[in-house]
Amino acid sequence: MTSKDSHSLDPDDWQALRAQGHLMLDDIVDYMANLRQRPVWQPIPQHKRDIFTEPLPTAPTDLAAVHDSFMQDILPYAAGNTHPGFMGWVQGGGNPVGMLAEMLAAGLNANLGARDQMPLEVERQVLRWVRELFGFPDTATGLFVTGSSMANLMSVLVARTAALGPQVRQHGLAAGGKRLTAYTSAGAHGCIAQAVDLSGLGFDALRVIPMNAQHQIDLAALQRTIAADRQQGFTPFFIAGSAGTVNHGAIDDLNALADIAASEGLWFHIDGAYGALAMLSGEIAPRLQGIERADSIAFDFHKWMQVPYDAGFFLVRDGTLHHDAFASPAAYLRREARGLAAGSPWPCDFGPDLSRGFRALKTWFTIKVYGAEKLGRMIAGTCALAQYLQQKIEAEPKLELLSPASLNIVCFRYRSADSDRVNADLIADLHESGIAAPSATTVNGCLAIRVAVVNHRTEQRDIDALFDAVISLGDAAMQ
Ligand SMILES: *Cc1c(COP(=O)(O)O)cnc(C)c1O
């Protein structure tokens, strides 16, 4: 029994909590096991939205009742990225092993900002594995972050500190009088521009270089732009290459970018948010050649490697530069040679977060339980499905391929005189049908249906279902 003056949030009856916990586990396992019987997505009825406008509850509610509300009001109206028919944007499907690990991590409630604790060794283990995967040296540092948006921002901050010296952290960007410029391709993710903005350089400091026919950064244009900037007194400092662009799955010529960065003395970052982990596949890895020469890489375990959200990672070749960009002395973060405050440097010395969750555990479980080979085959499998879809599109006169499958992404449209409107409607109709959820993008000025096969659960039958639904909805729109 708890004492009368206890304010603990623990239950009086652990057996009842355990029983309820088992029910919750059963429900979510049933959900995962039977995903295919559900719609990918369904519109949220207004009366369901209204449930979430209640005032702050002051009195307790039974856990079982709150769980019921989860099952009835939340779970059916999620975005559907666990579902095999989800092919929109670039999102991971999660996995049952990672889910169970997340439960263990929540129970442990580890805070991975600092101190001498085994959870940090798990994170360091994952760091060692990614060094190995990307051919980085033992002196490379890295850490889990929310996602590649954060990792890309951190790369600009490290590169800025490398270019201007640690004093930039004291005096700010303006003090040195240098006007830094950064370079990326028109196919790069929007978070690269955001990173340049958030780091205080301003959007204008980013030079957006056109793409070649393969949707890679145009190397000649890049070199011309760098030279022109130097002539005008700018200080070029940063190139962000792409390993898997969101629109086309294009991979920049990473070796050529590494050469340019080396000869120009620029930081070479790679946004490998979804594509970099294709290194797990022996088949695809050769296309990422040059990735081992990057100064830093941003990538997401929560996309192609299917770790439950969120699990981004930031890897830096030069651990000293990485440390110098973020570390700061704080009295309450005193470091000791022994005791719980030993073991520094800590993750809080390598990024802006102090308190951090145990993202490493679900990642460690996922890698250990499935093994790198199976994960690599799964990644290659999604690319094979994109090829399969491309072949079907090419054999169907009603459809037009807008960009061929590179990696796992295919863009196409239903042919029509009023194509943009018809295809936009078609995508929304598909979402509402619950059959499949591709997304929309623009390719060469045309609205395209964009299919990104990321989910490990997607199979040929799901591609067939998408294809058949596109044809029948497109035909209906032509009536
Ligand atoms: C998803 C993605 C991002 C953003 O990553 P988040 O994990 O969503 O923050 C950046 N670049 C590319 C190429 C992406 O696919």
Image (spheres, grey):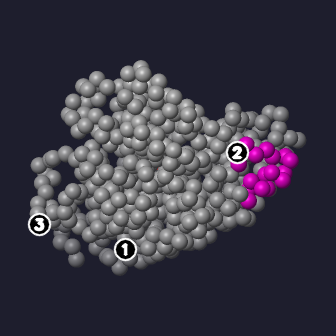
Residue under label 3: 338
Above or below for 324 versus 434: above
Give the Cα separation between the discs numbered 3 and 2. 58 Å
Q: Which residue is mark 2?
A: 403
Tell which of 438 and 284 is nearer to you: 284
Magenta range: 388-404
What amino acid type should be assigned to the residue bearing mark 1?
Leu
Q: Tell me the residue at 35%/52% (across/down).
A: 317
Left or right: 239 as drawn, with respect to 329: right
Identify the residue at horizontal 11%, vertical 60% (top origin). 336
Residue ID at (23%, 38%): 166
Q: Determine whether the residue tagged by mark 1 lies in a helix, strand or loop.
A: helix
C-alpha gap between disc 3 and disc 1: 38 Å
Circles 3 and 1: CB distance less than 8 Å? Answer: no
Q: Which quadrant does the N terminus fall into?
A: bottom left
Question: Circles 3 and 2: CB distance less than 8 Å?
Answer: no
Mark 3, mark 1: which one is toward the viewer?
3
Looking at numbered disc 3 in the image, what kind of residue is underneath it?
Arg
Q: Is residue 98 left or right of residue 85?
A: left
Residue 434 place in picture, x, y as percent? 68, 55
Earlier residue among tags 3 and 1: 1
Image x and y of residue 460, in percent: 72, 64
Q: Which residue is mark 1?
A: 17
Examine the structure image and report whether residue 403 is included in the region drawn in magenta.
yes
Question: Tag 2's secondary structure?
Answer: strand
